[in-house]
Image (tube, rainbow, N blue to C red):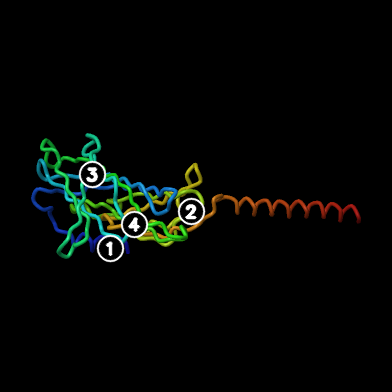
Amino acid sequence: MRAWLCALIAALLPAAPLAGQGYLVGAELRAALEHDPGQAEVRIRYRLRPDSAGAEVRLAALPVAGVQLVEVSADVGGAGRSPLLLTRRVDGPAAGRLEGHIRLPAGTPAGSEVSLDLYYRVIAPTPVTPVPRRVELPVLAVLWIPERAVPGVFRGTVSVHPGLEIGAAFPADLGRDPGRIREDGGHEYAFDLPVAPALLAFTLRTGSAFPFLEAFLDLTAALAILLFGWVGWRRFRAEM
């Protein structure tokens, strides 16, 4: 199924980048939900291959009702973070979309790989009942076509605090497994995709703050049953 989907995406994408742009080689996203489930810190590292020196990198994020992207900054090639201005498109089919652009340094050789790190915070209104709730994290995407539309081009992780877990999710990979348990007891969920998603959406729900508690209790109960059985058998033998 995934192979069929990747082939379809590859067929729909243009065969070559627009003039003055280039290819998306790969990307990695890391999102960490804060103590307020409506807020998250996001970092995305894009690996790009421009087709010309000084290529322009166009960025866009899907509008989500009530959700803001704040403290947006960018770092090209490890030169240091600088503020990135996003504006909202007011007309056309993409009206409401957040857009921005970055010009790569003029000394960037065409065909070479360069990194672009994007940082931002996502802020959504806090509901009366924090969990369960639907969380939507817009992805600030580079509008360059993938060099190869295969699984793993866009991969990432979403971390949640101890006592919380991710339920139904889009993309589906995000909620497919129980997630890696961090040292602090929180969960980290991983995913990989052939292209950049417009957003990450999932249900955040209450989970066990002690992920091994049930297994521990089951083991304790089993040992207690064995112990009582052994004691009972000894008494039964002694009375015979």
CB-based contact (under 8 Å), mark 2 and mark 1: no
Residue 199's disc is none
Residue 113 x %, y %: 19, 41
The Cα–Cα distance between marks 4 and 3, rounded to whole angstroms, is: 20 Å
The Cα–Cα distance between marks 2 and 3, rounded to whole angstroms, is: 32 Å
Residue 229 x %, y %: 78, 55
Give neighbour class at mark 4: few <14, some 14-19, many 20+ (Cα, 10 Å). Answer: some
Residue 200's disc is 4
The Cα–Cα distance between marks 2 and 4, rounded to whole angstroms, is: 17 Å
Q: Which residue is mark 1?
A: 5
Q: Which residue is mark 3?
A: 47
N-term mark: 2 or 4: 2
Quarter occupied by residue 104: top left
The residue lying at 50 percent from left, 43 percent from top is 184
Q: Which residue is mark 2?
A: 164
The residue lying at 22 percent from left, 47 percent from top is 25
N-term mark: 4 or 3: 3
